[in-house]
Amino acid sequence: MRIVIPGGSGQVGTLLARHLFAHGHQVTVLSRHPRPASWHTEAWDGVTEGPWVASVQNADAVIHLSGRTINCRYTPEHRKELLESRTVPTRLLGKVIAAANTPPSIWLNASTATLYRHALDRAQDEYTGEPADLPGERGTHEPANLPETWSFSANIGHEWEEALASVPTPKTRKIRLRTTLVMSPDPGGVFSVLSRLARLGLAGPQGNGKQYVSWMHDLDYCRATDLLLEHPEITDETDGIVNMASPDPLPNRDFNRILRHAWGRNLGLPATSWMMEVGAFFMRTESELVLKSRRVTPGVLLRHGFEFLYPDWTQAAANLVRRSRALRH
Ligand SMILES: NC(=O)c1ccc[n+]([C@@H]2O[C@H](COP(=O)([O-])OP(=O)(O)OC[C@H]3O[C@@H](n4cnc5c(N)ncnc54)[C@H](OP(=O)(O)O)[C@@H]3O)[C@@H](O)[C@H]2O)c1
């Protein structure tokens, strides 16, 4: 297939480009700062049309992943950038795809599992999951006293999906990838950040440790993408929504313990909620990324027979640690 990946220079994009290229697809990454890679890379700015339009219009599939990293403080300037770096390129792609004579048949667009509510009680899949409160809806689906930053980030996901829906593309199936933490051993990804804390003895329970962590192993993320490219119709009954998650979300306390053990560390200093707020401030990030309970499961993938290579965290963490060590040497 000819597959174009706008925003494909980041953590997830590099995983996917590498995987799809290795499986014989013709891969083009669109980037604001194109760098040489085994696959083709082309310049775009995510805002205006340019020579890249031909690649998108002649592709079989588009996988759109651009967006400013959420690992930052939610200052007014960052809030604007977090939103617009997702919605503006999404609308632009919609316009370009809608105008194509022979448009791609599939458009996978990144979205986020934070669209589901803060859930401690039960798993949230695509069929029965409940939405997080948006600004102005405080207390509708979640307790009213949750921090404002939580509804802010749910709203980003909401606006992002609205941008995807905003331009009709009758010949192109749209899929919303409600993605949990994608765990890969590559430097700079979320697994390397969490692993650093574990190796320093700092990955004890965070907050009260009861909040759930949802995650997906990188190989399963890539294999699930293969399935969606081959059988996009499996998302029709959920209007294109698919949770990119493993079937084993687990409480933060257990998640961190298993990660520490995978690195051969027993000690894990706990961090209470107020310590997380202070620490997040100094790390220039938001505690929501760790304290919100994301108990998200892959209903569509399971219903359609997807077999996870790494369904549980113990097995996945051991594999990721082994590959991280191999990369470091
Ligand atoms: N990683 C995860 O676990 C995870 C979980 C849930 C959702 N997601 C979402 O999935 C997408 C891909 O994740 P990722 O981890 O690969 O992200 P990433 O490493 O931060 O990469 C995202 C890419 O977006 C582009 N970008 C950044 N700021 C931009 C801006 N202002 N305007 C246009 N493009 C911009 C960058 O490409 P260039 O600089 O090359 O243009 C960057 O390489 C993101 O939208 C992310 O929010 C990721």
Image (cartoon, grey):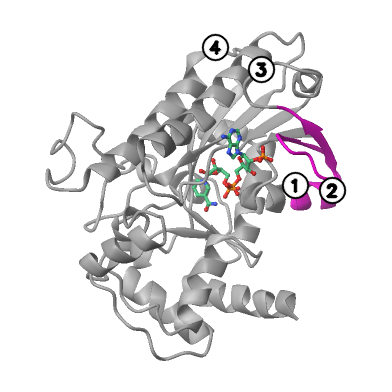
Are there few (<14), some (14-19), or many (20+) residues within 10 Å of tag 4?
A: few
Query: Callout 4: helix, strand or loop?
Result: loop
Circles 3, 4 touching at the beta carbon (< 8 Å)? no
Query: Callout 3: helix, strand or loop?
Result: loop
How many discs appear?
4
**Callout 2, which amino acid?**
Ala
- Quadrant position of residue 101: top right
- Quadrant position of residue 228: top right
**Callout 4, which amino acid?**
Pro
Mark 2 / mark 3, whichever is N-terminal: 2
Give the quarter the ligand 1 occupies.
top right
Report the Cα–Cα distance between label 3 and label 4: 19 Å
Mark 1 / mark 4, whichever is N-terminal: 1
Circles 1, 2 touching at the beta carbon (< 8 Å)? yes
Numbered label attached to residue 37: 2
Image height of 251 relative to 3, above or below: below
> Residue at left 49%, top 28%?
84
Instruction: Residue under label 3, please give it.
Output: 48
Judging depth in this view, the residue of 278 and 249 nearest the camera is 278
Image height of 63 relative to 276, above or below: above
Instruction: Residue under label 4, please give it.
Output: 168
Q: Which residues are magenta?
A: 18-44
Instruction: Residue under label 1, please give it.
Output: 17
Q: Is residue 139 magenta?
A: no
Are there few (<14), some (14-19), or many (20+) residues within 10 Å of tag 1?
A: many
Q: Nearer the viewer, mark 2 or mark 4?
A: 2
